[in-house]
Image (tube, helix red, strand yellow):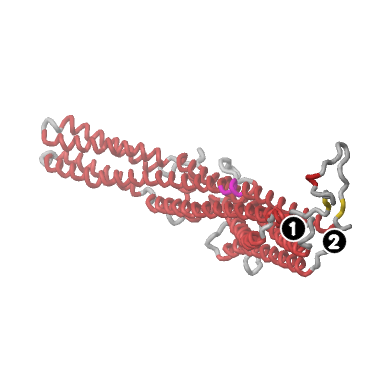
Amino acid sequence: MSSDRVDYIAPWWTYWLHNFPHINLRFQPIDKTFQPEDENYQQSLIFLGCVAAAGLGLNLLCLAIYLSCLCCCRKEEEEESKKPNSCCVTWSAVAAGLITCVAVGVGFYGNSETNDGVYQMTYSLYNANHTLGGVDSLVSGTMSNMRSGLHQHLARLDEIFATRGDYVQTLQFMQQMADNVIKQLLGLSDWEKAKVDLASIADQSATIEYYRWLTYLLLLILDLIICLLACLGLAKQSRWLLTTMMVFGVLTLVLSWTSLGADLATAVGTSDFCISPDKYIMSKTKDVISADIVHYYLYCNQTLSNPFQQPLAIFQRSLTTMQIQIQGLLQFAVPLFPTAERDLLGIQHLLNSSEASLHQLTALLDCRGLNKDYLDAMVGVCYDGVEGVLYLCLFSILAACAFTVMLCAIPRAWRQIACREQDYDDMDEEDPFNPRARRLGSQNPDHTNMHSFCSYSSSMGSQTSLHPPARLSPMPQCLST
């Protein structure tokens, strides 16, 4: 950026991202200038995605090694080893849940920030497109009035004033002024092409941003649901639910690394643009608009002269001269040629509308309006947009860490559930301290009624026929004796 440019300053994170190594697929360093059409520059962004893919491969390899060791190693059966492992699984699940919640919160914030930045950019593009469309409409309308409307009035007046040579010369002079106005309007740049390009960029950006926002919203919801279901499976000790969540956890892990690669490439590419956006814009518009005009609107300094000042001034002088000529004809020619009044008033009305269009055109061509739209677009992209993408990168990293911890904890929990069920199977069902026997006993009340091994009856008769002493109770007699 130029040293005298104080309106737009790229944020520090764009410089940090711009300093990332730019390496093509042949592992050769390339220029960091934003050149999306260049093949080597495209390869440098693809290389960043490949780095994320390598991280995914390393992550899956570590998980595979961990699961292989878990399956091959024998777990000790002592009671001391069971409790620490259970605590390890519990704390791993808690850590995975907390990291997932933090990741989802960061992801929602980053997704919203990115959407706000892109919306501000598209809004500014539509605003600039409306300004350029207004300029094109005013120019085409004024030229149409000068070519058709004024020409018809002058042709009829030429027939009326055929006998007066001085009046005919005045009409010819006015025709020259009208041609001069048309010439100045033709000297203006072709705004129509620039207007179409801005509208196309805004439409494409809005469409892409909508699908990007929706995709990340679904990914955030998916991460949260998988985390909740995994915690539910651990709490209920449901092996089928844990197995299902493990499969979805691997899928989410792949999606997290994929989104990290895409976000990293997007952030670096956008930061390269944000470092010097004026250079890229001038290189893209050099075949459409002159460099002086683009420079005037990008910087909009008081020291810069308006490139449209001269044609607009000639336009104004021509209209003023024509107005003076019409006033003279209305004053001196109408008393002699009453039929000419209608055409003269028509020309006067046409000149008044052209002068109003001139004032509107002068306001629209002022650099302050388009420069404000340009700065708003840069702030939206380089501040909110890139910042939001960085938060999405952080979300992807946190989500990958959370689901890695979850994928490490689920197999241990699955194995502990299997061992606990095996321990229940090895217990004696007749053991009254067996939890399974207790559950079965609660379901079968007749089985739990144990017969008494002692009897209070005596050989003298039934217990009800005896009158026990007032203070002493009879001693029980064992049936086995």
* Residue 103: image location, x then y, percent: 64, 50
Mark 2 Cα-neighbour bin, 10 Å: few <14, some 14–19, many ≥20 = few
Q: Disc count in the image?
A: 2
User: Residue at image x 62%, y 65%?
Assistant: 24
Q: Which quarter of the rendered picture does the C terminus lie within?
A: bottom right
Q: Amino acid at mark 1?
A: Ala
Tag in front: 2 or 1: 1
Mark 1 Cα-neighbour bin, 10 Å: few <14, some 14–19, many ≥20 = some
Q: Which residue is mark 2?
A: 78
Chain-order first, disc 2 or disc 1:
2
Q: Is residue 195 visible?
A: yes
Q: Which residue is mark 1?
A: 437
Residue 321 versus residue 446 in the image, above or below: above
Residue 309 versus residue 402 in the image, above or below: above
**Magenta stretch bounds:** 107-111
13 displayed left or right of 468: left
149 displayed left or right of 123: left
Residue 245 versus residue 372 in the image, above or below: below
Classify mark 2: helix, strand or loop.
loop
Q: Is residue 48 visible?
A: no
Q: Nearer the viewer, residue 398 or 405?
A: 405
Whether residue 387 appears in magenta in the rendering, the answer is no
Predominant SS along the magenta part: helix
Classify mark 1: helix, strand or loop.
helix
Q: Does the residue at mark 2 contact the one at mark 1 (Cβ under 8 Å)?
A: no
Q: Nearer the viewer, residue 290 or 298?
A: 298
User: Residue at image x 20%, y 32%?
Assistant: 328
Q: Amino acid at mark 2?
A: Glu
